[in-house]
Image: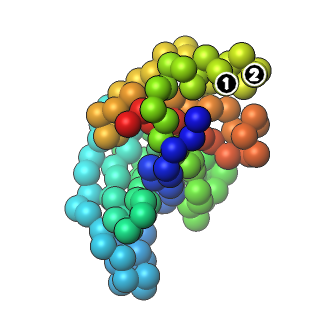
Amino acid sequence: MLGRVNHIAIAVPDLAAATATYRDTLGARVSQAQALPEHGVTVVFVELSNTKVELLEPLGADSPIAAFLEKNPSGGMHHICYEVADIIAARDRLQASGARVLGDGEPKTGAHGKPVLFLHPKDFCGTLVELEQV
Ligand code: CO
């Protein structure tokens, strides 16, 4: 069911500082910051040869990563995104196995304009999992 790792998302309290760490200390190629108000984050993409890392900073009052940063004030790995070919088939299979899909269970349009779903971390080794249909 799972394809490639699409991205790994890291929540950070200071996007400029995190970008400098990846660009200057780690020598990675980084994008300009992009505000995604409909997702409540500002994101910088770290482009790697085999996947991306997304640095996420809260944007707006009810950012979905605000609570995570309260618990992890210096930042931390927020979720991992796996590609799937058919997100509805993946959802149905996971729900049939007892896994919890967050929200109303219907795919939403993610940060890359593709359908995404999030899976409960308690069902997946303590890690928030995003599925993206590609
Ligand atoms: Co993501």
- Asked whether 49 or 108 is in front, the reply is 49
Local SS, label 2: loop
Q: On the rendered image, what quadrant is the C terminus found in? A: top left
Q: Name the residue under label 1.
A: 94
Whole-percent x, y for residue 33 in the image:
26, 58
Local SS, label 1: helix
Which residue is found at the position 59% from the left and 59% from the top? 76
- Asked if one can make out residue 134 in the rendered structure from this viewpoint, the answer is yes
Q: Which amino acid does label 1 sit on?
A: Leu
- Label 1 near label 2: C-beta < 8 Å? yes
**Mark 1 Cα within 10 Å, few/some/many (few <14, many 20+)?**
some
**Mark 2 Cα within 10 Å, few/some/many (few <14, many 20+)?**
few
- Asked whether 39 or 92 is in front, the reply is 92
Whole-percent x, y for residue 108 in the image:
41, 24
Which residue is found at the position 76% from the left and 37% from the top? 122
- Asked if one can make out residue 65 in the rendered structure from this viewpoint, the answer is no
Which residue is found at the position 56% from the left and 32% from the top? 118
The relative height of residue 100 versus residue 61 in the rendered view (above or below) is: above
Q: Name the residue under label 2.
A: 97
The relative height of residue 122 versus residue 98 in the rendered view (above or below) is: below
Q: On the rendered image, what quadrant is the N terminus found in? A: top right
